[in-house]
Amino acid sequence: MNSQGCLFRRFILFADYHGRTPARYSLMCFTAMTVGISFALAWLRLKSGSLWPAAIMHASHNLFIQGIFDPLTRNAGLTEYFTGEFGLALALAAMGVAMIFAQWWRSERRAVRAAIAG
């Protein structure tokens, strides 16, 4: 894990940077979300040739999750376990995004190999 990942891990476990769920649960969901989102960020970076589209996606993600969706969400008991950047719903959605991009990368690599071989 890179130094930024270790920094966030320390903030989640030892500071107050986590949801209202236990810190270990927040860490698991946040890690799954960041791994899943990293596939889309990497694709944006590689396809555009620039860091800016990925930076804008990251900023947009933070704006929508922290600034719009979290304030609009009503707490119904276990809401914190599912919503926000430390919740299970975003982690599962991000992992779904990762699977889509991984499948796309595999098919693109196969096409490149076939073009080189044939």
Image (cartoon, rainbow, N blue to C red):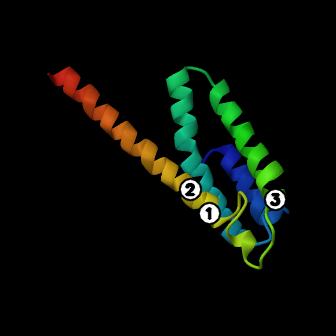
Numbered tag placed on residue 6 in the rendering: none
Work out which quarter of the rendered image holds the C terminus and state it. top left
Where residue 54 sits, quadrant-wise, is: top right
Specify the label residue 72 is tagged with. 3
Asked whether the beta carbons under mark 1 and mark 2 sit within 8 Å of each other, the answer is yes
In the rendered structure, which amino acid carries the disc numbered 3?
A: Leu
SS of the residue under disc 1: helix
Q: From what the image shows, is residue 66 above or below residue 13?
A: above
Q: Which residue is mark 2?
A: 93
Expressed as whole percent of the image width and height from the top left, the position of residue 30 reads 66, 58
Q: Residue at x 80, y 72 (%)?
A: 75
* Residue kind at label 2, given as amino acid type: Ala
- Identify the residue at horizontal 70%, vertical 66% (top origin): 26
Residue 92 at x, y = what percent?
A: 55, 60
Q: Is residue 28 something one can see in this rendering?
A: no
Q: Residue at point 60% right, 59% down?
A: 91
Looking at marks 3 and 2 on the same chain, the residue that comes earlier in the sequence is marked by 3
